[in-house]
Image (cartoon, coloured by chain):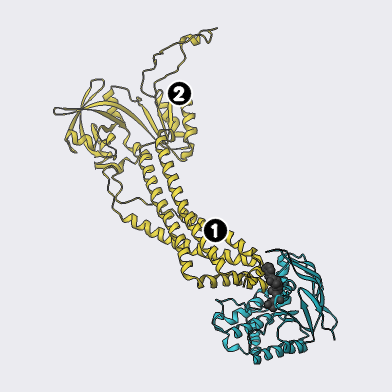
Chain colours: A yellow, B cyan
Amino acid sequence: MNYFLLLQIALTHLRSRLRQTSVATLGVTFGIGMYISLIGFMTGLNNLMDDITMSNTAHVKLFQDIETNRKTVLDKVENSTPMTVVHHLKPKNTRKNIRNSINILDILKKDERIRDFSPRLTTQVFYTFGSIVLNGTALGIDPFKEQEVFDIKANLLEGSFEDLDSYANGIILGSGLAQKLSVMTGDRVNITSATGAQFSLKVVGIYEAGISMIDDIQSYVTLATAQKLMQKSKDYITDINIQLHDKELAIVLSKEFSQRFGCSAQDYITSNAQFEAGSGIRNMITYAVSITLLLIAGFGIYNILTMMIYEKMDDIAILKATGFSGKDVKNIFISQAMIIGIIGGILGILLGYGTCLAIDQIPFESPAIKSMDSMPINYDPKYYIIGVAFAMLTTFLAGYLPARKASQIDPVDIIRGK
Amino acid sequence: MDNKQVLIANKINKYFWKPQKFHVLKDISFSINSGEFVSVMGKSGCGKSTLLYVLSTMDTDYEGELILDGQTLTGKPNQDLAKARNEKIGFVFQFHYLLQEFSVLQNVMLPALKLGKLSKQEIEHNAYEKLKLLNIEDQALKKSSRLSGGQKQRVAIARALINDPMIIMGDEPTGNLDSKNAQNVFEIFQRLKEEQNQSLLIVTHDLDFAQKTDRIIEMLDGRIISHGYK
Ligand SMILES: Nc1ncnc2c1ncn2[C@@H]1O[C@H](COP(=O)(O)OP(=O)(O)OP(=O)(O)O)[C@@H](O)[C@H]1O
Ligand SMILES: [Mg+2]
């Protein structure tokens, strides 16, 4: 009852200063609106970049690295002193494939934490078509497994990965590569491997990852074709890409696998360290700008309430003289601030949502990113809740100081001042 | 019942420090019984308003003791003083003080709504009664800023009456009224005293008005020079 009464007094005050109230409310609306649209746009962009990067990166990647820092023969000699130093140690292990791969794949298959995995054979090749000879990489994959691990299908412009499997000697070329070789689906290209073996392969598809560094040199063949190219046995693979159920486990598992299998392992965070740093900085900028906007809105409220309190000195004195306590008066002014905050916040959400919808309409076509046709926007309700919560917090703080001052005003001072 | 002391002031002293030390109230001691209608007179600037602010608990910067309804109010926290003002004191300012943005009716109702003892309907009904008493019920729904000075003063009196206070304090409540309305206010006060045993302490410059009250407290330079007992 009492609070309802105070709220009514607060509302009457706000109504009597409609213009100032509107300006203060619009300040909050603008602050929250900008926050919502900025954050929606920025996080939308970040998520898109995340998706693109993640679609090319497995949670954990196993591969055979060249061994460095290995123990020398001298270290193994009994009674050897730390005085022995071997300079310019030559790498001993020259193999590029993962040892004991059949066993490893077996173990991976049984691991509950792993969602999908796909073995690969990456090898250097020369593409020849007519007189053109291009240097590049061929990825030997299991088309079905690879599709589980990476969304390669989305990047396919022509053909299908199933054809890769059904044609014994099929190849899918990167779009840049296909253009340089001026081949289309159905044509044949000659491939020369590092070992000198030559094959004539049929183009069964063309794909585009959106990154020219990949599209200009890379092609997909089946694992079996790649092994034939390399003249290696059926267990010869160079890396295994693993997707986990819970990507947070990536760091732990990559350590575990590298120890257990005796090969190198890299988690996605290490692989994308640069990218992560970039998106972190982008987020920081977004938050800094948003907080600045909200603070400006907060200062607006602070100003207007302070002014309101000076104008309402008489009212404060009368209310106190007729039995309203300092606390009541404080609550009246805090309510005014909160009303401005809530209305401004809700309008701000609508403004922000509207702006997001508008930005979403802006066509944005990038040759680098084929999957995008308009600006990416994140509509996560989390940010809308944060926006309103922050609006209420700032308005409360902005209202608190002037309200406390009002509660401390001595009515006699004002009455005597007349 | 007649002898029950509603308000006791005990050796009240007050100083103003700015611009220089000024002893404005000097050893003020008196009491008011229930049902007593007392007026305060004295030259302009002798400290009547200052005394009333102290007695109404709005000014707490004084020495001495103030007892209202058997309860010592000196040194009480602000919250308690606000409650006492709301419940037990009806105050009419020298200059009519109304909430400008509220209607006349709302102005009168607010202290009762704050007290929260009655329902809104009952309070509204009571407020109309008080306005009727002062002949301004026809202005009830007007914004209070749209009233004449005399009308405002009558609304302020109605507001002072709304919670049926223990004591009504008025700082020249008839100062802005014509003689007819001043007479009406006096009659209302007199009736409250007779019918409800209301205590009143009214500062006035109007000798006619004062002479009709039970006794006149006379002040000079911050001191009571006569308690007016016959
Ligand atoms: N805030 C103040 N600071 C210093 N002196 C003050 C202050 N307020 C009032 N005074 C002085 O205190 C004295 C008493 O003032 P007060 O208002 O009580 O007079 P009053 O008896 O009500 O006069 P009036 O009949 O004109 O209303 C006056 O001399 C006045 O100048
Ligand atoms: Mg005075």
Pick whichever, A229 or B110, lies toward us.
B110
Instruction: Tell me the subunit letter for badge 1.
Output: A
Vertically, is A88 above or below B22?
above
**Comes first in the chain, label 2 or label 1:** 2
Single out the residue that lies furthest toward the left. Answer: A130
* Residue A272 % position (x, y): 40, 35
Which three-letter amino acid code belongs to the residue tagged 2? Gly
Asked if badges 2 and 1 are on one and the same chain, I answer: yes
* Residue B134 % position (x, y): 65, 88
B150 lies left or right of A263: right
Q: Which mark is residue A398?
A: 1
Label 2: which residue?
A262
Vertically, is A416 above or below B103?
above
Vertically, is A373 above or below A10?
above
Q: Pointer 1: residues within 10 angstroms few (<14), some, or many (20+)?
A: many
Label 2 lies in ligand 1 vicinity (Cβ under 8 Å): no
How far apart marks 2 and 1 lie (CA) works out to 61 Å
Quarter of the picture holding the C terminus of chain B: bottom right
Pick whichever, A289 or A414, lies toward us.
A414
| Helix, strand or loop for disc 2 | loop
Q: Which mark is residue B51?
A: none
* Residue A239 % position (x, y): 37, 29
A163 lies left or right of A129: right
* Nearest to viewer (mark 2 / mark 1): 1
Give me the residue at 54% from left, 58% from top: A398
Give me the residue at 47% from left, 55% from top: A296
* Residue A285 % position (x, y): 43, 45
Give me the residue at 82% from left, 77% from top: B31
